[in-house]
Structure formats: structure tokens, C-alpha cells
Amino acid sequence: MASEKLLQFVDRAQAYPPKRDAGHRASDFREIAERYAPPSAEEQAGRCSQCGVPYCSVHCPLQNHIPDWLRLTAEGRLREAYALSNSTSTMPEICGRICPQDRLCEGNCVIEFTGHGAVTIGSVEKFITDTAWEQGWVEPLVPGRPRGQSVGIIGAGPAGLSAAEYLRVMGYDVHVYDRYDRAGGLLTYGIPGFKLEKHVVTRRVERLVAGGIVFHANFEVGRDASLEALRQQHDAVLIATGVYKPREIKAPGVGAGGVVEALDYLTASNRKGFGDAVPAFDDGSLNAAGKHVVVIGGGDTAMDCVRTAVRQGAKSVKCLYRRDRANMPGSQREVANAEEEGVEFVWLSAPEGFTGGGQVNGVRAARMRLGAPDASGRRAPEPEPDSQFTLDADLVIKALGYDAEDLPSLFGSGELGVTRWGTVRVDQRTMMTSLDGVFAAGDIVRGASLVVWAIRDGRDVSDKMHAFLKVKARTAEAEQVAA
Ligand code: FAD
Ligand code: SF4
Ligand code: SF4
């Protein structure tokens, strides 16, 4: 019986949950696709061929048990599918929404290679856990037997929150410090609602609060306490602060009014979504309404900016990127979404300056061509001679990516070891930094990466911290006995 529900990839076409019409969805910040209605999720899960060596799982950073929960879904055993999916991930419904599946699980599904189209793993994953929330299957976080030891976690993004959850389940007192007023990191203030509606993040955070994790909001380590002070207060500390130093454009006029930074722009928009007062949005500086907008960059952040500008009612939205479509870092799926919503891509073009004096009114750019591959293996762009052109722009958004802030200085902790990129250096075996009992995880170790990798790091580092804390407790006990 069960097998009839599986291996259906030849007869049953690949189908993602339908996207809302581009005209409609571009006027609000709701997610662009509804989720599967049953039985479509079951039917789509039934396309899986239950590979002996599932490449989908191999290429999932969490090594999720994908074929197993697909099988349970195909058989209508959704509650069991949820339990299994939840056993390897703290946020399956979030990954199902925002992982670049085309590069991870789905991009490596064998059915994709047979030409029938990958199993729609991410959409099924989202369906399973959204259903679990609705049905009340998501259980409260139950803290483990109290160990009398505490951990301090700096940063409430996906890395910090995942570590917090696992450590609380192990019985530690967990304190999370974040400089923002809301937890979630980039899930809350970076990624827009049309990719990830905010209530999806909020309900996860509320579950952690109910489980006894203590959140210290508006608490900036470096300003409100030094790293050393946290080390004194806790038995172990985790640095999970992400990367927030924007890469700059060196071109004349870049300091003009109307040339803004992507995360300032996205944070303002997300805050408006929460109903906050945002003076820089209300006075128009971070609002694209009625403006010609040019976004510079070709990554996920740039894609989020162009699509936010469309939703704010910009007059025109262009994305300027120095390489071509095939060589951009952002997801092709997001480019297609943006194009459907009216964004124009100006490929192979780089800014040379900004016109308008005190207030920007245009971007001077040059055409580029792709030369020989550089050290990273990607073909390096070089300017075409005499190819300058100008684009109208009342708002220019710089989205060139992020590097690590100077944590040793910010934290007043010169002994904290960092790499030449400023990311925190850890011992790969222990995930400990150069400071005893101080660990690090997520983007601050990897550089700008993905939510799913931050979750993976949070899972791994909680095990490493647990191992360290057990030894510390045993040593303290032995010392007491000896005394
Ligand atoms: P973060 O999420 O950055 O969280 C770090 C937290 O630390 C923040 O809350 C910050 O306030 C806090 N903090 C920093 N310094 C201090 C301090 N001194 N004291 C106290 N708190 C501090 N990834 C995907 O997988 N899919 C996507 O679609 C996607 N879209 C993205 C869109 C944008 C605009 C951006 C910028 C990134 C996107 N990413 C995406 C990447 C993803 O968001 C990150 O890789 C991930 O959030 C990293 O998690 P983290 O926990 O390491 O850091
Ligand atoms: Fe795919 Fe991401 Fe889910 Fe892994 S976590 S199965 S990569 S969507
Ligand atoms: Fe199923 Fe595709 Fe994974 Fe194979 S690779 S187990 S077909 S989802």
C-alpha cells in the first residue's frame, strides 16, 4: 500500500505551491506563495524515489532525514513526519521557506537529474511544521534537570537561538543578550516578510521564552558589559553576533543624501511592518515610495532590497550588478521573482560615481565584461572602455555584502583571536575561541552565510559547550572534595 504512494515522479509532475499573482503580491509584504493544501503535499512527497544514498540529505547542512519524512508525509503520517523533521532542526518551517533549495537539497535530488524535476523538499518541510503548529503538535521546550551552571549567548540570531534551545534542554540556565529590541537577528530585521512572515519567527522566540531562556534585549556587549564581565558571570559564553560591517563603494558622491545602506533600509521596512515609529522612514529617507531606485549588488540582500522597493511603491527599480546573471551570487529563484514583480536588472555594470551633489539624482556607471577567473575561480569583471552611462536615481541602496565588525575592540578583549577577515577564529574540533570557555558560531565564524548553516553551528556548538561544561563541573567538584 505504502509503495503505491511513493516513487510517483514519472506520473506525477513536480508542483510547487502556486505563487500569488505578481501584481497582487507586489503590493503587500505577505509571503508570495500559499502553502500546499492537503493532499498536494502528500502527493508531492510521494514523488520521492527513497534513494539508498539520499543526496538530498547529504547536501542539506543539517543532514535532515529527508526521505524518511517524505515517506511519512506520503503515507499521511504527518505527526510522525513532524517529529522526525524536528529532531534535526530547531526551525524546519523557516528553512523550508528560505533555504536556497536549488543549491542544497533539491539541487541534488536524483530526480532533478533524470529531468523530471526535484522533489519539492522545502515546500513539504514548511507544510509539515506549519501543520504541526496549527494542530498543537509543537511541544513546549522542556528544560533538562538543572545543572547549576549558566551560559551567556551573545546574539539572538538563528545560531544563538538554536544553541540556546539545545543547551536549555540539557539543563543549563541560558541567558541571551542582543543589541536589538527583538530576538531573531536577520530573521527579524534583515529578511523581508515576503520571504518569511514575522509571526513565524516570533512564535519560535515565544516558545524559547516560555521554556525559561532569559532574553536581555537592547543589551549590547561592548557597551552595556564587556566580554570579560560576561565570562565572570557565566560558566561559558557563546559569541553568535553575525556580520554587520557593510562593504563600501569607493566612488565620488557616495556620501550624498539618498545613498543608503541596505541593512538600514531593510531594518526600517521590517520595523514599519511591526508598527514601530521609524523617523528615517517617515521623513522619506528610507522609503522608496515615488522614487527612482537603484540597488547596487547581486546577492540575496540586493534581491530583498529591490523587491522591498517595489512594495513601497517606487517609480522604477533597477538592480546594477557587475557580473552577469549566470555569475551572480543571489538565488536565480529570487531574480525570477523580482523580474515578475517589475524589477529591471542592469547586468555587467558597475557604479563609477553619484551625481546630484548634496542629494543624489543619478548613478554614473560603466559597462563591464568578464575577464579571466580570479583567485576565487569566478571570472573577474573589467570595465569596457568608453561605455559610461547614467541612470536616474533618487534613492541608491548599497548592497555589496558584509564583513565582521572589529570584535576584539568592540568587546574590549584584545586577546580574542580573529582571522585576517575579522571573523572569530575557533578551534575546529572544539569550536572554542582563543579564550577559555568562550565559543563562537554562525556568520561571525563563517563570514556571511546561510540561516541553515547558522542552525547547524548552533546545534554543533551546544554539544561542544556541553562537553566543556561537564569537565568544568567535574573539576569543580573534585576541587571541593580535595578542599
Ligand atoms: P545574525 O542573524 O546576524 O544574528 C546576530 C545577532 O547578534 C543579531 O540579532 C545582532 O543584533 C546581535 N549582535 C551583534 N552584535 C552584538 C553585540 N555586540 N551585543 C549584543 N548583540 C549583538 N540566508 C538564508 O539562508 N536565506 C535567505 O533568504 C537569506 N536572506 C538574507 C537576506 C539578507 C538581507 C541578509 C543580510 C542575509 C540573508 N541571509 C539569508 C543570511 C542569513 O540571514 C545569515 O546567514 C544568518 O542570519 C546568520 O545567523 P547568525 O545567528 O550567525 O547571525
Ligand atoms: Fe533543504 Fe534547507 Fe530543509 Fe535542509 S534545511 S532539507 S537544505 S530546505
Ligand atoms: Fe527522494 Fe530526491 Fe532525496 Fe532521492 S534525492 S531520497 S528522490 S528527495
Image: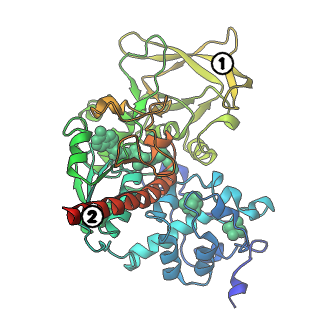
Three-letter amino acid code at the position of disc 2: Ala
The three-letter code of the residue at mark 1 reads Arg
Quadrant of the rendered structure where residue 242 is?
top left
By what rule are the colours in the image chosen? Answer: rainbow
Q: Say which quadrant the C terminus sits in.
A: bottom left
Residue drawn at (27%, 46%) of the image? 178
Relative placement, left or right, of 350 versus 204 is right
Examine the rendering and report whether any part of residue 40 can be seen: no
Residue 409 locus on image (x, y percent): 31, 28
Question: On the rendered structure, is 45 left or right of 150?
Answer: right
Q: Which badge, 2 or 1, comes first in the chain's sequence?
A: 1
Image height of 343 relative to 453, above or below = above
Residue 477 lies, in percent from the top left, at 25, 65
Circle on res. 478: 2
Residue 337 falls left or right of residue 398: right
Q: Looking at mark 1, is its residue's CB closer than 8 Å to ligand 1?
A: no
